[in-house]
Amino acid sequence: MKETVVHVKNLKKIYHTRVSKGLFSTEKREVEAVKDISFDIYGEEVVGFIGPNGAGKTTTLKCLSGLLVPTGGEVEVLGFKPEKRKKEFLQKIALVMGQKSQLWWELAPIETFKLNKEIYGISDKEYNEVVNEMVEILDIQEVILKPTRNLSLGERMRCEIVAALLHTPELVFLDEPTIGLDVVSQHNLREFVKVYNQRYKATVLLTSHNMEDVSDLCKRVIVIDHGVVLYDGKISELINGFVKEKHIHFVLKENISPDDFKGLGKLTECSGNEGTLVVSRERVSDVSKELLNLFEVVDLDISEPNLESVIKGIFEGGYKI
Ligand SMILES: Nc1ncnc2c1ncn2[C@@H]1O[C@H](COP(=O)(O)OP(=O)(O)OP(=O)(O)O)[C@@H](O)[C@H]1O
Ligand SMILES: [Mg+2]
């Protein structure tokens, strides 16, 4: 097991806010955004941190990067207490928020890169190496020279990530990095995260509502809701634990008569020469063979349960952890 990079024990965060009450008065209100969250993250892991809107993900990431002071619990990140915001700590981490820009709006991204170079005290040699490498992988040679305000969202996000990772932090918090991006840009960004993780042996904690981000990048996932952890473990085990059945969709040469499928499984869809059988995971190969034996099969498709459907089931209350 690699060394512990993030240690969180019984984290609690209460926001104190005021809400308006009538026209002229306000009332104090407490929001318990994080109730009791504990987990450890180890070196070079890429972990998905998921949960519905308002679950407490961003609040947790802000506590881990030192932007918020926890109300209770223990937080230790790379051996530091994040809230102290020591220079050595800030040099080693980055928080990238898909909904917030750190690039100067009126200037070209390259100018923000240069500013960050000075802020983090990066040598000319290292700066040139890192920028050239990242710009090439992300294919933004031209883009970094245009004013940020003229860039498309996808172009801007690619520049954001370079600006945020120029100092090559060993721990990266990504808060919805692909929000609003088209599928090609999402893919590019994910590929970049993979390269960064391997090239710099970096640890990554990622929040996203896009389950493809999570299933493509992470082996482990931490699921939270209402400020508490619901699941922490392998994605594969989460899926296997919940989904006991698979769907076999088939197309036959002749039209289907539902009676022919008795004993094979539950026929859920059936029209013309197409149908779908729901069978337990263990029986998938037997039932497929049987189908091929009994009928003239034109096409057969076995669909795997995916993370998206499992997570949807959990949050809609269909699955209980
Ligand atoms: N500055 C704040 N003041 C008061 N309440 C806040 C503040 N920031 C967040 N909250 C509340 O804390 C709770 C958790 O918010 P948080 O932003 O951590 O959720 P999230 O899991 O990141 O959600 P999303 O998926 O929508 O980004 C929500 O109820 C939110 O309204
Ligand atoms: Mg959030």
Image (cartoon, rainbow, N blue to C red):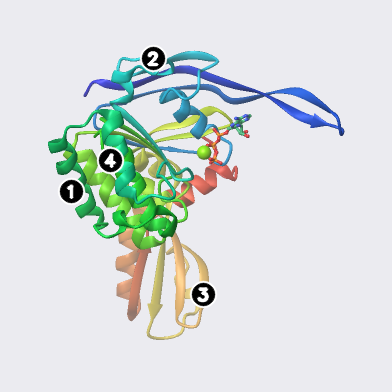
Q: Which residue is mark 3?
A: 270
Res 216 seen here: no
Q: Nearer the viewer, residue 106 or 45?
A: 106
**Going 86% across and 30% down the picture, which residue do you hit?**
24
Which mark lies nearer to you, 3 or 4?
4
Determine whether the residue tagged by mark 3 lies in a helix, strand or loop: strand
| Amino acid type shown at disc 3 | Cys
Q: Nearer the viewer, mark 4 or mark 2?
A: 4
Q: Secondary structure at mark 2?
A: loop
Depth check, front residue: 282 or 7: 7
Amino acid type at image mark 1: Asn
**Pointer 4 or 1: first along the chain:** 4
Q: Label 2 crowding class (10 Å Cα cut-off): few <14, some 14-19, many 20+?
A: some
N-term mark: 3 or 4: 4
Q: Are marks 2 and 3 in contact (CB under 8 Å)?
A: no
Label number found at residue 81: 2
x, y percent for residue 134? 22, 48
Could you say which disc has been placed on residue 132 in the image?
A: 1
Considering only vertical position in the picture, is 303 above or below 95? below
